Image (cartoon, rainbow, N blue to C red):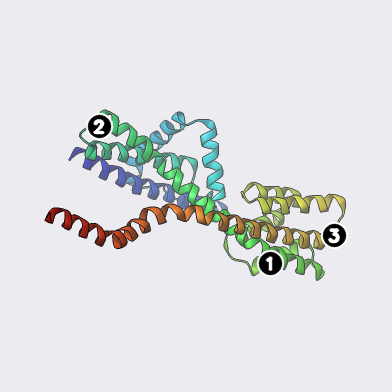
Amino acid sequence: MIALAVVFVAVGLGVASAGIYASRSIVATANAAALEVGEPAVVHGGVVHRALEPLLDQAARLMRALSPAARLDLIGRRIVYAGLESRVTVENILVRKAIAAVAGAGLGVLVHPHRIPVLLAAPVLAVLASFVPDVLLDSKARSRQTQIARALPDALDLLAITVEAGLGLEQALSVVTERLDGPLGDELRRMLAEIELGVDRRQALELLRSRTDVRELSAFVIALLQADELGMSVGDVLRVQAGQVRLLRRQRAREQAAKTPVKILFPVVLGIFPAMFVVTIGPGAVTIVRSLFSH
């Protein structure tokens, strides 16, 4: 009962932490807007917020102290790759890891096998459960980067056609983003907003490259930077890059197709072959057993 209560408390803290960090971002935005118009700031939080926030902050500091600097940097980059930097922070992920570890320890106390002592099952499950937020964040980042890679060839074709029609690169990107949805469109719109705010085009392209983990997009940015330095035609560069991106996507599809027989081998051996053996050999085996026992 104690372990079950610990699990429920951990789940409740997870929901509360998500609400607290969401309210933090909402209140921060409201305070910034209020300060711009000269109004008083918004009061931050309520009774539950003030009661749980110090506990969650302490858990975040503890997890930060236990985590290596390289791990914290990796979490930060995964947050950026997943497009969650405006909603999720490293501290938020650390709090979720701490709550998952507590839930895993409680689960280890509750359902551990009799042959495994509690002092061994609880820490092992706590360590394993602490990696669940990392796995979910990594899955989100990989999915977003895959969507960017899939949308890039069509975006480059449209961008090349628009540039060849006589528009500049920024105007062409504006036209493309109006017709482009998904993560790639969001990243290009963000780059255009940075350029409109006064960021140099080269720096905006470098920031775009740092926010993504797509090899094709990185090659596209490098080609644009080189074309800008050498005075080459942007339309020709875009056309070549679009062809190369399509070639890479075709090669990746062939690699995935070549791996399919290996991936399907284990389901076939474990799932289909036993059923086939039961259907084909089963009746004969039953007949043999009956004949042996009859004699």
* Residue 151: image location, x then y, percent: 62, 62
Judging depth in this view, the residue of 251 and 164 nearest the camera is: 251
Question: What distance separates the C-alpha of mark 3 from that of mark 2?
Answer: 68 Å
State the mark number for residue 116. Answer: 2
Q: Identify residue for label 1.
A: 176
Q: Sequence order check: which comes first, mark 3 or mark 2?
A: 2
Q: Which residue is farthest front?
A: 295
Is 159 positioned to the left or the right of 143 in the image?
right
Q: Label 3 neighbourhood size at 10 Å, few (<14), some (14-19), many (20+)? A: few
In what element is the residue under mark 3?
loop
State the mark number for residue 233. Answer: 3
State the mark number for residue 209. Answer: none
**Mark 2 or mark 1, whichever is nearer to me:** 2
Judging depth in this view, the residue of 53 and 204 nearest the camera is: 204
Q: Which amino acid does label 2 sit on?
A: Ile
Q: Label 2 neighbourhood size at 10 Å, few (<14), some (14-19), many (20+)? A: few
Q: What residue type is labelled 3?
A: Ser
Q: Do the residues labelled 3 and 2 touch (CB within 8 Å)?
A: no
